[in-house]
Amino acid sequence: MCGIIGYIGGQPALEVALAGLRRLEYRGYDSAGVAVVVDGGLHTLRRAGKLANLEKALAESATSPRGTVGIGHTRWATHGGPTDTNAHPHTDCTGAIAVIHNGIIENFASLRAGLERDGHELASETDTEIVAHLLEDELAAVSAPDGTAGAGAAEGAETAGASRLTEAFRRVCRRLEGAFTLVVVHRDHPDVVVGARRNSPLVVGVGADETFLASDVAAFIAHTRSAVEIGQDQIVEARRDGVTITDFAGNPVEGRPYHVDWDASAAEKGGHPYFMLKEISEQPTALADTLRGRLSNDAEIVLDEERLSAQDFRDVDKVFIVACGTAYHAGLIAKYAIEHWTRLPCEVEMASEFRYRDPVLDRSTLVVAISQSGETLDTLMAVKHAREQKARVLAICNTNGSTIPRESDAVLYTRCGPEVGVASTKTFLGQVAACLLVGLYLAQVRGVLYGDEVARYVEKLQAMPALVRQTLATIEPMRALARTLADARAVLFLGRHVGYPVALEGALKLKELAYMHAEGFPAGELKHGPIALVEEGLPVVVVVPSPRGRSHLHSKIVSNIQEVRARGARTIVIAEEGDTVVEPYAEHLIRVPATPTLFAPLVTTLPLQVFACELALARGLDVDQPRNLAKSVTVE
Ligand code: M6R
């Protein structure tokens, strides 16, 4: 949830950290802070609120720290409100150590009590601050004459000091429970920045005579595209000339180097006032890139990292999809396709509930974990649980090098590029497309569909980016309509079949962006209770299935539209071109191109994204950084 950057090199660390935090602010924006090591001292500044508050405070401060070693943090509050005092970095009693943290230290209360008993004074309400104080104690212990300084003891004074810091930090990490990425600087050890991770992301950026530690490559992409993955329960000691990685026991570990294949401009707004608008407009490309090259010459779907054989997929007798939020909605759509194409039972489950209800899993279960970030802790824990139960796990992910793909047996990457706006848009389309590919792949390896049938579906899928482009080009009426509804109190969304998850997604977008009460329902369920919500003037958005695909569903939803109209609702109808039957019942009719039934969400979702975005803007809200949210949710 929080954004973290650490830097050691030849540039002013403050500027590098602030530029990195600007790119990481989507991860959390309750408060921000920096610490820079300068001439044997530690210069720390923290401010509640967005990064701009910190930048203002820095601009007004008499001294601007010029050191080349530092850390920066942008926070999404968990323990303690978003105040200056709770903002990171946190320091120890001596003011020598500064720590930044992403995650939750679950045993912090007992550790804090112990520290306070020993005379430490903690200033904040955070779980993070204990790390600085624990490190203070452990450092004193390893530096004591009888302490174990580790390998560095026999080396030069500075190296030995850095090794002692790393060893002390290792000892601290071993005492922590929960999820954490931690990055630490010490005023007396200006030659290193030390980081650690457990169940929370940390990547290294390797530049020329400079090294970065960050929660996400976006933080350093302007400086280097060479990255190294830090694995679970590992410590990284970063120096100007490289890194040393060890596990929490001190054993050396090889990091996995990789090249970041997008550049800084991909994360810029590209002329749009908001990332969300840019990302909505990028959907045709995101979809095309996700589909590109996925069909081999033998008409086989190609996965990216496959540690499963075709036989493993043939052995599958049940599919579970686990995901959260928007990714969960993509999973709901996948269920229709997977069951239809493969005849395998497919259950879709919110990842946060999955492991707590003891699902029935075994070697023949395929668990598909969908996550844009690849770091969502609820989903990661569901993946771990599934693997413990011997199920096979296939990840669908947008972030190369992230944790969920690493913890899975196989991966299919959505190639949507960086998504900075907190609301998922282009990655939803990528996830739906990837799910459809997985369904086709399963159908093919299991012999339910022939290669030429799969190829025909893929061909139709490959025509979808053009239809997405066409939909976006004609979406202005939806924008104009949304602007007139800024004062609405609530909005309902109805759908049937694959239109139902689209309705849920439309409601989620409106809730998170416009802070409005919004609910999505299967249109047939309305009469079982929710219809009581319908009152004069209530906007009701209806996602209408194609009359060509499932004509009985089409006529049923037309009846549902009439039911809400009869009770005074303002009907906003999303229907395919040429569907004239709905015309008399639609107060506002938004057209989308005709598509195969299972591919319809790739176009019907778009007006709902635009609706939520425009309505939120009309209410004067920040659509890139809605309140209380963060892009990457690394706490349970
Ligand atoms: O990174 P993930 O796809 O795992 O994130 C899951 C949800 O937090 C995410 O889809 C969230 O619901 C959307 N950003 C909302 O627009």
Image (cartoon, helix red, strand yellow):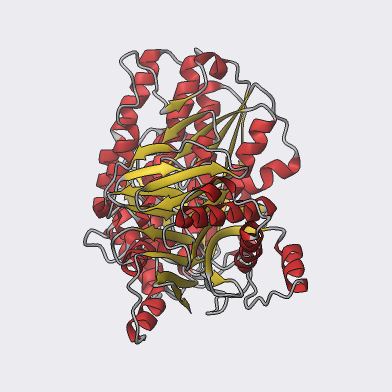
Residue sitting nearer the eye, 206 or 192: 192
Residue shown at 47% from the left, 76% from the top: 46
Residue drawn at the location 64% of the way across and 52% of the way down: 171
Q: Residue at x 63, y 41 (%)?
A: 382
The vertical placement of 282 against 297, above or below, is below
Q: Position of residue 147 (x, y in %)?
A: 66, 55
Direction from residue 613 to residue 1 in the image, left or right: right
Whether 482 is drawn above or below 399: the answer is below
Q: Is residue 524 above or below residue 222?
A: above
- For residue 227, side relative to residue 80 (left or right): left
User: In this image, 123 relative to 335: left or right?
Assistant: right
Q: Compared with residue 125, is residue 253 higher up or lower down, i.e. above or below?
A: above
Describe residue 457's horizontal placement relative to residue 631 as left or right. Answer: left
Instruction: Report x, y in % for residue 196.
Output: 54, 51
Q: Position of residue 48 (x, y in %)?
A: 49, 78
In the depicted view, which residue is nearer to us: 87 or 144?
Answer: 144
Q: Quadrant where the C terminus lies? A: bottom right
Q: How many marks?
A: 0
Q: Residue at x 29, y 45 (%)?
A: 262
Give the x, y percent position of residue 499: 48, 44
Residue 301 visible (yes or no): yes
Visible in this render: residue 587?
no
- Comparing 520 with 81, the one in front is 81
Residue situated in front as seen by the camera: 353 or 125? 125
